Amino acid sequence: MTAGAEKSAEQVRAMAASARAAARVLAGTEAGRRDRGLREAARAIRAARAAILDANERDLAGAAGTTAAFRDRLMLDPARVEAMARGLEVIAELPDPLAREMGEWTRPNGLRIRRVAQPIGVIGMIYESRPNVGADAAGLCVKAGNAVILRGGSESFESGRAIQRAVGDGLLAAGLPEASVQSAPSAERAFVSAMLGAGGAIDLIVPRGGRALVERVEREASMPVLAHAEGLCHTYVHRAADAGMARRVVANAKMRRPGVCGATETLLIDAAIAPDLLGPIAADLKALGCRFRADARARAIVPSLPAAEEGDFDTEWLDAVLSIAVVDDLEAALAHIARHGSSHTDAIITGDREAAESFLKGVDSAVALWNASTQFCDGGEFGFGAEIGIATGRVHARGPVGLEQLTTYRYLVIGSGQVRP
């Protein structure tokens, strides 16, 4: 082990130990105290707005030459800082996830068994680009009684540290352990390896970023992983779609924020409606700055569309680029999504209820929508206050991960002297 790796391992061990102690305090703390901590953290973020924006300027200066969509993910402004603070307050207003009794029953021998919610413990969060992710993760973890260790991307390191310091100040003001929310002391890549090797000290690791990050975490982690896979999202415009609705929804799904994981990356349009509707949809998107990669059938209708290359329909653009394919029918759309999708978020636009219900049942996505933008795949829009990520696996959680998904459960068994025969 190199000196840098050993140093990172020591840092992770020390941070995880203090996080474990903080998690025990949080788990035994009344909901009102945790809520006060989040409100104090919101106040501290507002008070530190200038410092957070200065830190973000340094990060942006280091990201010169990157795409506009990447810079949008990285950039903070006063409105986004306020949104972080407000997000913490919204989380504080939500019901206590630890107050849930998930089941109760009595056995024939008189034993009464209760299943109750409890925190997971120490969570590690590895994320890229978007510094507000750290604030969301901190708020959700603290509310659910967990401590969290944050490792943001090197491109957002300064912003992430400034946000974490403000959150820590707020927790201290409420009498909660500052170690409830910690962040990596440097942008050293060895720190990620040390986190992934800290099974037993860190209970759950949550990666939030591109394919390379998620695949590395899944490959190397020594603890359970709550994976956030690519957002290779589709919007399918069915033959029974309302044209005006389709144009509005597709424009929003692609161009509201092209760099978020819920942005539509592929437009599928029914062959029966494509001759009339594909041109107007493409014109709308082009006016908003979108570029295209289209299959031969789409180009036969709109010849000015650039041709798709091999791999384009398997690409999460995270940019103002849209892949377009014309499909014969609903079954062909579902087959395309099954072949190229990432089980994240997919939508159908149609006025045909039977077709919509077939799509919702047939698509294997964490989130499926009917007549709505894929950009609604978001914890805040689901009423979760925020999200720690969009889970695309099939164990423990799927879709936006909020408070309930950051808890587990245990059993309380009440007897009256029973012994087992």
Image: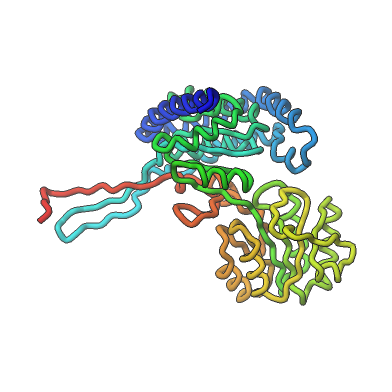
In the rendered view, tell whether residue 225 sits above or below residue 370: above
Residue 84, quarter of picture: top right
Q: Position of residue 369 (x, y in %)?
A: 62, 62
Look at the image and tell me in which quarter the C terminus lies: bottom left
Q: Position of residue 420 (x, y in %)?
A: 12, 54
Is residue 400 visible in this depiction of the protein? yes
Is 115 displayed left or right of 176 in the figure? Answer: left
Q: Position of residue 42 (x, y in %)?
A: 56, 30
Q: Position of residue 243 (x, y in %)?
A: 77, 68
Is 28 displayed left or right of 157 in the figure? Answer: left
In the rendered view, tell whether residue 187 sits above or below residue 350: above
Q: Which residue lies at the image location 39% right of the left edge and 31% below the top edge?
A: 20
Residue 191, quarter of picture: top right
Q: Which residue lies at the image location 58% right of the left edge and 72% below the top edge?
A: 357
Is 364 displayed left or right of 26 in the figure? Answer: right
Nearest the eye: 350 or 258: 258
Q: Residue furthest front?
A: 1
Nearest the eye: 58 or 38: 58
Q: Which residue lies at the image location 35% right of the left edge and 52% below the top edge?
A: 102
Q: Residue furthest right?
A: 304
